[in-house]
Image (cartoon, rainbow, N blue to C red):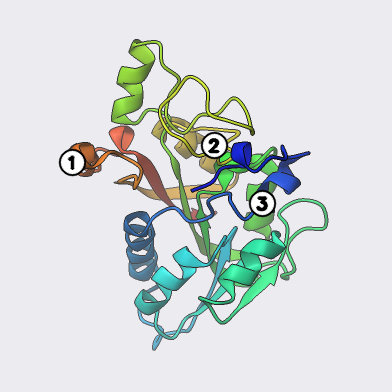
Amino acid sequence: MTTPATTGRPPRDLRDFYENPAVPVASGTPRSLRQARMLARALGPAARTPRTVLDIGCGDGTAAATAAPLLPGHRVIGVDWSQDALRRARTRIPYAVRGELTGGGLPFASASADAVLFSEVIEHLVDPDAALDEIRRILRPGGHLMLSTPNLAAWYNRGLLLAGVQPVFSEVSLRGIHGRPGKEVVGHLRLYTARALKEFVAASGFTVVRLEGAPFHGVPRPLRPLDRLACARPQLASILLLHARRT
């Protein structure tokens, strides 16, 4: 896939970067399926009470489209501020609206959502504190937050750091990859360990219910069995899947 570094025009700022169609906006089906199953267990059957689920930072709609068959009867709405991402999302999901976590906030009333999918978004944010404040505002008391993000302390990153190599998922430039494996620039600004993520979410007014691990689709094929094994210990997994509820 072409990265911003090879398009001939460097991004002016983060908004310009994310409006570039070459920037990846999907994070892999295995992670999306695991996250959707966690949410389905939490919500229960729609026959009991249909719920409103917001996929905030929906990107191209892959995560919401993956979750929808596991959430029959529930209403899944994609939310993103990138017009390019929304155009792609609307080809996969019936509802996709523009909204921002900062500035004017999301276009939803307080306590109007039952659950939020927040997949591979928080690592891209300048102000994650304000983002969780806004998510807490729109969630009903006891509402569910399903957050996923790369793990700074993934099993291979521990070895890379010992060797003096920049960890996977971390980035020092929007124009190219420097000092670490990989080819795609995706705009990561913040990275979390399992412990840091749980503490941060709890400090933002949520009760952490569960933390699970998920594999990363970018791991080289010969190492994927190890990556799947690491999911048994979230502290070592490639991707952190956290379920929390609004306190």
Measure how far apart labels 1 and 2 are at the Cα level.
26 Å
Using the image as rendered, state which of residue 17 and residue 138 is in the foreground: 17
Residue at position x 53%, y 51% in the image: 24
Measure how far apart labels 1 and 3 are at the Cα level.
35 Å
Using the image as rendered, state which of residue 116 and residue 180 is in the foreground: 180
Task: Where is residue 210? Give x, y as percent.
Answer: 36, 49
Crowding at mark 1 (Cα within 10 Å: few <14, some 14-19, many 20+): some
Q: Secondary structure at mark 2?
A: helix
Measure how far apart labels 2 and 3 are at the Cα level.
30 Å
Q: Secondary structure at mark 3?
A: loop
Residue type (three-letter) at the residue carrying disc 3? Asn
Q: Quick one: label 1 or label 2, which is nearer the N terminus? A: 2
Residue type (three-letter) at the residue carrying disc 1? Leu
- Give me the disc on residue 20: 3
Task: Where is residue 232? Give x, y as percent.
Answer: 21, 42
Closer to viewer: mark 1 or mark 2: 1
How many numbered circles are shown? 3
Residue that badge 2 annotates: 200
Q: Is residue 69 above or below residue 2?
A: below
Residue at position x 47%, y 31% in the image: 196
Horizontal placement of 8 versus 69: left or right? Answer: right
Q: Marks 3 and 2: in contact by CB < 8 Å? A: no
Quadrant in the rendering for residue 141: bottom right
Quadrant in the rendering for residue 52: bottom right
Task: Where is residue 151? Give x, y as percent.
Answer: 41, 35
Crowding at mark 2 (Cα within 10 Å: few <14, some 14-19, many 20+): some
Q: Is residue 24 above or below residue 163?
A: below
Residue type (three-letter) at the residue carrying disc 2? Phe
Quadrant in the rendering for residue 39: bottom left
Closer to viewer: mark 2 or mark 3: 3
Closer to viewer: mark 1 or mark 3: 3
Residue that badge 1 annotates: 229
